[in-house]
Amino acid sequence: RWTWCDALYMAPPVYVKLYVLTGDKRFIKFMNKEYKATYDLLFDKDERLFYRDSRYLTQKEANGAKVFWGRGNGWVLGGLAEMLQDFPSWDTLPYAQAGNGDLLRKTEILWWNLSLREQKLLIKKGQLL
């Protein structure tokens, strides 16, 4: 099971490539099942961002704000871009489309641990991916 958000960058594109190489739909079906499980676990539907892993689901900043990993959310987007180049036209990723506009805008803010209330630990543009 993929239990951290940057796994959505690492694994899904490989399974899509395996499908392209073999034509075996089991690769896409497995990838969809695992992607959805990770999405369901780590995606915060209110903030429309991914937590880094399950340890962060209950962590809070000193001011009570949720903690997100900006670079990890960038990895999720990078994985989608990589995967969708070869994604079969017969399949869909409705869970992967949810919130991507917000995710792009929020990752553009560019800080390490994304605090939605405080900007801290800023990183330079280009270090995101």
Image (cartoon, rainbow, N blue to C red):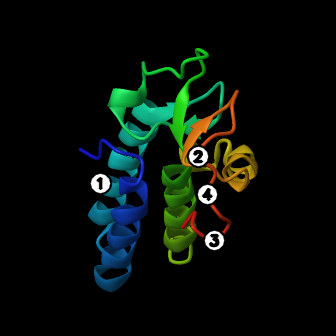
Mark 4 or mark 1: which comes first in sequence? 1
Mark 2 or mark 1: which comes first in sequence? 1
- Kindly identify which residue carries mark 3: 126
Residue 83 in view, yes or no: yes
Cα separation, mark 4 vs mark 3, equals 9 Å
Q: How many marks?
A: 4
Type of amino acid under label 4: Ile
Mark 2 or mark 1: which is in front?
Answer: 2
Which residue corresponds to the image point at 54% horizontal and 62% vertical from the top-left? 80
Q: Residue 115's image quarter?
A: top right
Mark 4 or mark 3: which is in front?
Answer: 4
**Observer-nearest of 86 and 127:** 127
User: Mark 3 and mark 4 in contact (Cβ < 8 Å)?
Assistant: no
Q: Residue 14's image quarter?
A: bottom left
Cα separation, mark 2 vs mark 1, equals 37 Å
Mark 1 or mark 3: which comes first in sequence? 1
> Could you tell me which secondary element the residue under label 1 belongs to?
helix
Mark 1 or mark 3: which is in front?
Answer: 3
- Kindly identify which residue carries mark 1: 30
Which residue corresponds to the image point at 51% horizontal and 73% vertical from the top-left? 82
User: Mark 1 and mark 4 in contact (Cβ < 8 Å)?
Assistant: no
Tell me the crowding category of disc 4: few under 14, some 14 to 19, or many 20 or more residues within 10 angstroms, Cα based: some
Name the quarter where the C terminus is drawn. bottom right
Cα separation, mark 4 vs mark 2, equals 6 Å
Q: Which mark is residue 121?
A: 2
> Could you tell me which secondary element the residue under label 2 belongs to?
loop
- Kindly identify which residue carries mark 4: 123
